[in-house]
Image: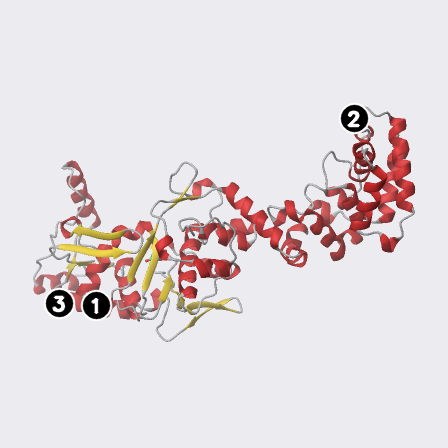
Amino acid sequence: MTDTKKVRVRFAPSPTGELHIGGLRTALTCFLFAQKNKGTFILRSEDTDRKRFVKGAAERQLRDLYWAGLTIDEGCVLENDLIVEKGDLGPYTQSKRLAIYTKYVQQLLDEKKAYHCFCSADRLVEMREVQQAQKLPPKYDRKCLDLSEEEIKAKIDAGEKYVVRFKIPEGKTQFDDLVYGKIVVDNETLDDLVIMKSDGFPTYHLAVVVDDYLMKISHIFRGMEWLASTPKHVLLYDALGWGEDMPEFCHMANILNKNKKKLSKREGSVSVADFRAEGYPKEAIINFIALLGWNPKTEQEIFTMDELIDQFDTAKMNKAGGVFDLDRLAWMSKEHIKKMSVDEIYNEAISFLQEKDYFKNATSERQDESYIKKIIAVEQDRLEKFTQIGEDNQFFFVDVITDKDLLKWKDNSFDETKIVLTKAMDILSNINEDAWTRENLENILMDAAGDKRGDFLWPLRAALTGQKRSPSPFDCAWIIGKDETLLRIHKAIELI
Ligand code: GLU
């Protein structure tokens, strides 16, 4: 590939289920690289495995990508929530490209670089068992390699099923991977792979090579699990006469669990949809995913998408797998929520809040946008997810039931507690509604507390919240408002 070749990268998901965290990482890497190099980010749907096809999965995967901020320039894009194809090098859905694959398979057959194979599944199983018993690597034994034209024709005419296999040439195959460096394999170790299945569909290996070439892909980013297939792809490029236009390969290390094993679905949430439903901001998910396998080599840990684009560099990709650490995600999430505006948090969080019983049971005043935004302003720095709004402080929504003993600070008596609460009541009832601000309340109540903070502020906070732990009494008073504050103090005094 020449340096001047335009950057064109593709994400090529198979519509077999939800978008996985690993898939999002591949897509994000493509996106960052394309953005950084003013290139094109293409989405191709690899839907040739009809057995694993899941209806609606392609749409859901695309929605998740767009949700995360990865807009697609070409290929299968979303318009009005529907998948449409955009671009001149389509179709971008493999099942619509069957005639193209057939043409290239025929070319390889004509040039004797591929051959028909009529072996039954049973025979192949038997062959493998024998190889296993002899501790040989599983490899097709080329029984069908030398069938004559007549034999082939006779079998096809008789309705025998066949696949087409690529004949691995002799020699060695070599390529440079942007992460793993120079890879050399002895072709002896490679199996004559099937390129066309008996249903007339191409296999992944053929389709990926044909499509990447015809779609002028410059760089291939994909998971490590495809590294071992790449020599076969290199051989196919050569066999098809495209060796000069081979893309760059960049394989990404596995995402690992805490035990340093490859992350699997068995470990709970690994789909983007799950994390989304759990209330993590997309900025945090993107930040977290980006750093799984890519190291900016600075102290910085919190990145916006623009910063990621700016600093992304394939030279900083790790060979070792990145560990998927949920505590780190939670920390990043908290840092991103801190940076958001109250309005932004409100827009993201409101749908989660509306699902909560404490919200559903609240009066309409307490469901009001301006009321919730005050809660957000107070809780913002502690939130790890949007779902947590109000969770620890349900007294903002529903009435409190205070435990009498909770009102007392340390060894103070009930009488002392009553005096303190009465004093608070007096002070607060003298503050005008328009002076009922967060700042004023803090100044006035801190003044009143003097150096006896616990004695004064504890009973007040307990009266307002009914909880041992909560935001400060000034913040709570500010949120619930003057009337409710006085009412709760009054109830607490009555309780004593
Ligand atoms: N369809 C393949 C997958 O879902 C894509 C592999 C590739 O990028 O070449 O993993």
Vertical position of residue 133 compared to residue 239: above or below = above
Q: Quadrant of residue 144?
A: bottom left
Task: Mark 2 vs mark 3: give the one in front.
Answer: 2
Q: Are marks 3 and 1 in contact (CB under 8 Å)?
A: no
> Between 291 and 267, which is closer to the camera in this rendering?
291
N-term-proximal mark, 2 vs 3: 3
Q: What whole-number distance in Å separates the C-alpha atoms at marks 3 and 1?
A: 19 Å
> How many neighbours does mark 2 have within 10 angstroms: few (below 14), some (14-19), or many (20 or more)?
few
SS category of the residue bearing label 3: loop
Per the model, the C-alpha gap separating discs 1 and 2 is: 80 Å
Q: Which residue is mark 1?
A: 244
- Indicate which disc residue 417 carries: none
Q: For this view, does 324 lie left or right of residue 188? A: right
Report whether 22 appears left or right of 373.
Answer: left
Residue 182 percent location from the top left of the image: 23, 53
Residue nearest the viewer, comparing 60 with 152: 60
Q: Quadrant of ligand 1?
A: bottom left
Q: Nearer the viewer, mark 1 or mark 2?
A: 2
Query: Which residue is pictured at 37% across the width and 76% down the height?
Result: 88
Tag 3 residue? 111
